[in-house]
Amino acid sequence: MSTVYLVGAGPGDPKLLTRRAHELITTAEVIVYDALVSPSILALIPEGTKLYHVGKRYGAHSLKQAEINDLLIELGTADLGRVVRLKGGDPFVFAHGGEEMTALREAGIPYEIVPGITAGLAAPAYFDIPLTHRGLSRSFTCLTAHTEDGELPDFDWTSLARLSGTLVFYMGVRQVAQISQALIAAGMSTSTPAALLSRGTTPQQSLLVRTLGAFTDTSEDFSAYAPALFMIGEVLQFAEGRTSLPLSGKKVIVTRARHQASVLQEALEEKGAEAYLLPTIQLTPNEEVKTELETTLESLPSYDWILFTSPNAVEFFFSALRQRGKDRRLLAPCQIGALGPMTAQSLSAYGITADFVPREYYAKVFAEEFIQRAKLTPVHRILLPNSALASDDLSELLSEAGIACHRLPLYQNTPISYTASELKEALDSADYLTACSSSAIHHLVSLLRVHQLEHLLKALPLAVLGEQTAEAARSYGIEPKLIATQPRITCLVETLVKDATN
């Protein structure tokens, strides 16, 4: 049998995952997940994992609970490795985790419970709202807003109205008016602060604060706020001091290769943006230079310099060393150059400080400054590890100056395919598109041309990392709206923030 792990995914922000949850999500062979598990958390699931979507939303259930129980028993009975049942929030807080645990127990299936942070605790915190506060709230009560048949539960409303604490109703969007009327009828003041906390802890979170009396209109439709909590209590006054993040409500497309995207994604999300991953390329070792690579590594002492023009070149070069049981000591006879600070930072992760970084981070400036340096200290032979699609500009400029330059295309940029509907979904509602390399631009344009969707790219504000990427966009008649003044992820994000807040 396989062990079934009932795992809480938390309220949406992947940073709120427990270490155990993250470990299981990234190593499971099978994952059965809910509709409330955020896309940012689903993006952590490795390719090749068998996925079952059993999401349940009000009025639209993909599977009934009994069918989900049966599926878990079926998966647990088979020898599949780790089976993760991934549930929004905490498995035991309004999530049917107890029913699923009981079904597994009765079937003799081994299981493990992995708690998660429930939305009722996390979402208020993201809006600076304490659930309890001295002099305002001595308790908090979490309640479900509807029964299995969709009706308002038959609570002791008089007791709830007298609690002098904080009330948090889960799944309450359709019952807001009825809850408000019931509490007022039970004696709660119409002036009591109340709020809808929508999509808390995610980049799309929003807060609608009113008085309880202002939520009693049964004709008002709050479905656009779902999923949301309905919260009532004096502690909501603290929400007044909350300031929104500068990119809140902005959808920013990230086209970097998936293994690189996390740095930009996290930086954008810290500023409140929804970072939508649309990688246009995947990077793979260039098998065509396997023999050449072996010969080159054996002859490294014959090179005066190794010039790295990108973090990817650094990663693939050192990966090749590791695979062959070698390390940075092999580079000892050589001096090291880096095209820019991001490349220099990648080298520093391997304990190497670049001997040369140009004052500007473009191939022409790199070549000019390096050639001037070579006039003082002769340079005979250079190794240039890079991409199979990299421009020949740098190697040609160095060769023209009489410096022998061996270009080693270590990796390939392979395009990723998308359907027309996937591209439309990503680009139609976006506020910005980011590109960190020329290859990202070239591959994205190729993708859009296949589906005759180039107009979507031209209609979007484009933010790029450096002049070289900007030139790639201009070659297609697209003028970037924003160009980061320095080729750093932080600089790109700051440029977006400045534009969004002007």
Image: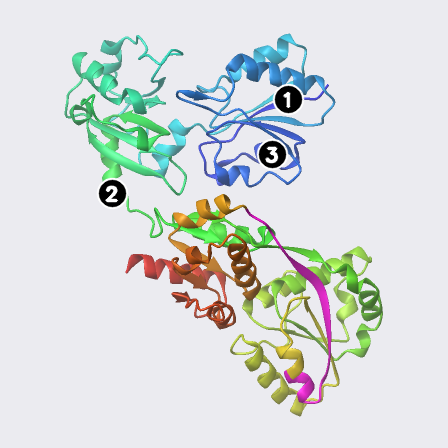
Distance CA(mark 1)–CA(mark 2)? 44 Å
Above-or-below relation of 397 to 84:
below
Hey, what amino acid is under mark 1? Val
> Which mark, residue 383?
none
Specify the color scheme. Answer: rainbow
Hey, what amino acid is under mark 3? Ile
Q: In this picture, which residue range is highlighted in magenta?
A: 397-418
Distance CA(mark 3)–CA(mark 1)? 12 Å
User: In the image shown, does 485 or 51 lie closer to the viewer?
Assistant: 51
* Circle 3 residue: 25
Is 413 covered by the magenta stretch? yes
Residue 306 visible in this rendered orientation of the protein: yes
Residue 131 sits in quarter: top left
Is 318 covered by the magenta stretch? no
Residues marked 1 and 2 touching at CB (< 8 Å)? no
Counting residues from the start of the chain, the first of labels 3 and 2 encountered is 3
Above-or-below relation of 463 to 192:
below
Counting residues from the start of the chain, the first of labels 3 and 1 encountered is 1
Tell me where residue 344 appears, x and y as whole percent. Answer: 60, 68
Question: For mark 3, does the 10 Å Cα neighbourhood hold few (<14), some (14 to 19), or many (20 or more) residues?
Answer: many
Q: Is residue 94 left or right of residue 80?
A: left
Residue 305 sits in quarter: bottom right
* Circle 1 residue: 4
Q: Secondary structure at mark 3?
A: helix
Question: For mark 1, does the 10 Å Cα neighbourhood hold few (<14), some (14 to 19), or many (20 or more) residues?
Answer: many
Q: Is residue 93 left or right of residue 397?
A: left
Distance CA(mark 3)–CA(mark 2)? 36 Å
